Image: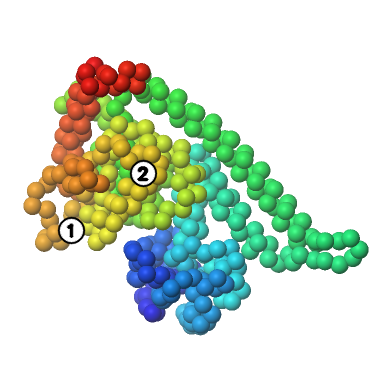
Amino acid sequence: MTNLLQPPDSPNAPALLVGVDFGLPHFDDKLEELGLLAQTAGLCPVARVTCKRRAPDPALFVGSGKADEIKTLAAQLGAQEVVFEQSLSPAQQRNLERHLELPVNDRTMLILQIFSQRARSHEGKLQVELARLQYLSTRLVRRWSHLERQSGGIGMRGGPGETQIELDRRMIGDNIKRIKDRLVKVKRQRQTQRRQRDRREAFNISLVGYTNAGKSTLFNAMVKARAYAADQLFATLDTTTRQLYLGELGRTVSLSDTVGFIRDLPHGLIDAFQATLQEAVDADLLLHVVDYSSVDHVDQIAQVQQVLSEIGASDIPQVLVFNKLDAVATEGQPAVMQDVYELDGRPTPRVFISARQGQGLPLVRQLLVDQVLTAHSQPAFDPDFPESREAGL
């Protein structure tokens, strides 16, 4: 199926979006999120092409017939790039570029490009570069396809192409090792900062949620900060921490804004951003921000829960913040502004807000106060004396 899009008045390069339905859940037949990713990466989607297959074609992913259709459509619309919803193997990417005679990228590469554009801190740039090199290391056969392996001459088994690939692979491997070593130092620095907060008995809260759910807008509203916030995917990549004063308690808590999650987040990025996501792992409480105006908000909650489980933060107490109430139609407005939501089988406090308009923020502050009081009322557990849990010591 092919759908033409009304191209916006944009100087960005026109791109064709392609998605293949393999019968798996959560297939986006409108490719809306891929389109947002493409726009955020600096492309202008002009059409989307979808098809159904039982399994990917080993050579061209979509098969030769659909590849011919994509090539014709791209020529008619003047598309300068083709972007696939699913991840492509290096061989499929190389074959498609030769067949379509256009640059071909996938969802993973789009996310990497966005991260490269948005990283600002030293740590963020290191993490992006690590993920980019790890991705590129699997694409060497495509990057150096113009250097054919040559044979000929007595005793010669390979030519300059083979040598260049080997040299490039070694160079990338050395760079990956160097960046990992530097990230270890950054992680140690963060651990030192956390120990200092722990000595002050700080209560640490991390904002988590699907990308573009409004975490940074809520963060700015809560602590009067000026963190970058925009209606786009991955507006925030670098962790920002500020002190939030809770007058009802007469004390401050530590509030951190973290990178947003997304469906099918490449595992390489999860590994590369481990130091940043560590803020969520070490938090005492997670403020899970949800875009209530999105028709996919239930699935997005599940995606965030999956990533939290992967990084070891699934057991941390949460408060669900259903944001963007101002963008919800009248019939979708909640009957009450605060209730309890069943999250992974556990009753979880939920509040409805509009961070942009400031609606519901007092409820969020009161929930934070309740959570801090609850945490301090629970007896500490000493692992060296397991009986202290039962004795309440």
**Circle number at residue 309:** 2
Residue 378 versus residue 323 in the image, above or below: above
Label 1: which secondary element: loop
Tell me residue 324's x, y (percent): 22, 52
> Could you tell whether 274 is left or right of 351 in the image?
right
Viewer-closest of 278 and 101: 278
Tell me residue 204's x, y (percent): 31, 30
**Circle number at residue 171:** none
Residue 325 versus residue 199 in the image, above or below: below
Residue 102 versus residue 75 in the image, above or below: above
Q: Quadrant of residue 85?
A: bottom left
Task: Name the residue located 22 percent from the left edge and 57 percent from the top edge.
Answer: 293
Check disc 2: other Cα within 10 Å, few if <14, some if 14-19, many if 20+. Answer: few
Is residue 47 visible in the rendered image? The answer is no
Viewer-closest of 351 and 124: 351
Identify residue type, mark 2.
Ser
Cα gap from disc 1 to disc 2, whole angstroms:
30 Å
Q: Which of marks 1 and 2 is nearer the N terminus?
A: 2
Task: Name the residue located 29 percent from the left edge and 49 percent from the top edge.
Answer: 214
Tell me residue 210's x, y (percent): 33, 51
Looking at the figure, which quarter contains the N terminus?
bottom left
Looking at the figure, which quarter contains the C terminus?
top left
Which residue is at the far right?
154
Identify residue type, mark 1.
Val
Label 2: which secondary element: helix
* Front label number (1 vs 2): 2
Q: Quadrant of residue 52?
A: bottom left
Q: Which colour scheme is used?
A: rainbow
Kindly identify which residue carries mark 1.
328
